[in-house]
Image (cartoon, rainbow, N blue to C red):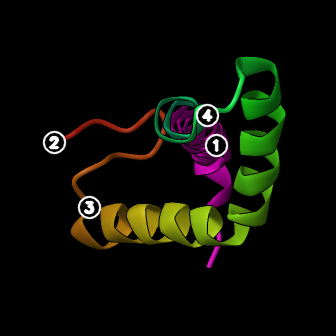
Amino acid sequence: MRATPRRHLSYASFLVLLVVDAVALVSLLMVQLLGVPMPIAWPAAGMLTIAALPALLRLADKVFEMARSERTIPNTGESFL
């Protein structure tokens, strides 16, 4: 289930951070472990991350569902009290 409408910006920014981190991590692993040149590693890491995007979407959904069920993270404009 997708995030509530008031959390779309938080959801989108979290997903962007997940994707950027995944691209950077895969690129770093390709360069360090496989010895792939950097100009080849970044596009290849991007393609692998695009292939893993459904898993990243499920991860983001689970994180936001846990936040919603625990009620520890307020919606935009709400207070903790």
First in residue order: circle 3 vs circle 1? 1
Mark whose residue sits in front, 3 or 2: 3
Q: Which mark is residue 27?
A: 4
Q: Nearer the viewer, residue 77 or 59?
A: 59
> Which stretch appears magenta?
1-27
Mark whose residue sits in front, 1 or 2: 1
Mark whose residue sits in front, 3 or 4: 4
Tell me the residue at 61%/46% (across/down).
Answer: 15
Spatial separation of the CA atoms under disc 3 and disc 4: 36 Å
Q: Is residue 7 magenta?
A: yes
Q: Are marks 1 and 4 in contact (CB under 8 Å)?
A: no
Tell me the residue at 70%/52% (across/down).
Answer: 49
Q: Which residue is mark 3?
A: 71
Q: Which residue is mark 2?
A: 81
Identify the secondary structure beneath mark 3.
loop
Tell me the residue at 62%/33% (across/down).
Answer: 20
Q: Which mark is residue 6?
A: none
Q: Position of residue 35 (x, y in %)?
A: 59, 32
Position of residue 29 relative to residue 68, above or below, is above
Specify few, some or many for label 3: CA neighbours under 10 Å numbering under 14, 14-19, or 20 or more.
Answer: few
First in residue order: circle 1 vs circle 4? 1
Q: Quadrant of the N terminus?
A: bottom right
Q: Which amino acid type is marked by label 1?
A: Val
Q: Which amino acid type is marked by label 3?
A: Arg
Identify the secondary structure beneath mark 2.
loop
Q: Position of residue 44 (x, y in %)?
A: 79, 42
Q: Nearer the viewer, residue 13 or 70?
A: 13
Identify the secondary structure beneath mark 4.
helix
Q: Position of residue 57 (x, y in %)?
A: 63, 65
First in residue order: circle 4 vs circle 2? 4
Q: Which residue is mark 1?
A: 19
